[in-house]
Image: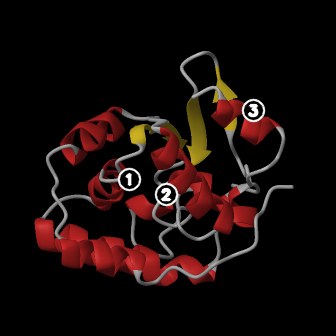
Amino acid sequence: MNSVPATVAKSAVNHSNVSVEGPSHRLKTCSSAIWSQSTKEEREMFGLLADQAVSSLTWCPLASGRLARPYGQQTSRSANDQIGKHFFDDADHAIIDAVQTVANAHDVTMAQVALAWILSNPVVAAPIVGATAPHHLDDAAAALKVTLSGQEHVMLTAPYTPRQPTGY
């Protein structure tokens, strides 16, 4: 497994939003239903992780809250999130709608569906949820009980469109 950090350090693989930590070689990647699969780097990184039997700690699994509420619904945080405006845009509308549709079918919150989707990826060890309120922790725990069908996975992944890496 020592080859993974060396490969990433040599830039032999794309490493958008990735950091390698300590001897356990656990990687942190930005991953949400919006971000994951939407960039070439994320798709390649998860393939490498699976091949090397390395897990991922994903951050931003709810896309800064955008996957926790219907499209267009603003909070004071999202209205003033200058960084998020660089990562998320109108192309995410179909993805957010799909999360809402699946959440309604399961009678659970959108956050639970988005987290269940992340947790269904075999290389994800855990999402870093960034809870700012007690109910965020409740949603994270409840996501463990949400099982998505194959059809629901297709529904959640179908709207993805490749996008250029951002944040550089």
Nearer to the camera, 143 or 165:
165
Q: Which residue type does callout 1 highlight?
A: Ile
Which residue is at 38% across, 79% downward? 97
Which comes before the other along the chain, label 3 or label 2? 3
Q: Is residue 156 shown left or right of residue 89?
A: left
Which comes before the other along the chain, label 2 or label 1? 2
Which residue is at 60% across, 53% downward? 45
Which numbered tag is attached to residue 118? 1
Location of the N terminus by quadrant is top right
Residue 3's x, y, as percent? 66, 33
Nearer to the camera, 13 or 121:
13
Q: Is residue 64 visible?
A: no
Depicted 109 relative to depicted 91: above or below:
above
Q: Is residue 137 shown left or right of residue 52?
A: left
Between the C-alphas of marks 3 and 1, the distance is 26 Å
| Residue with the mark numbered 3 | 6
Instruction: Determine whether label 2 and label 1 are within 8 Å by CB.
Output: yes
| Residue with the mark numbered 2 | 32
Q: Residues within 10 Å of mark 3 (few under 14, many from 20)?
A: few
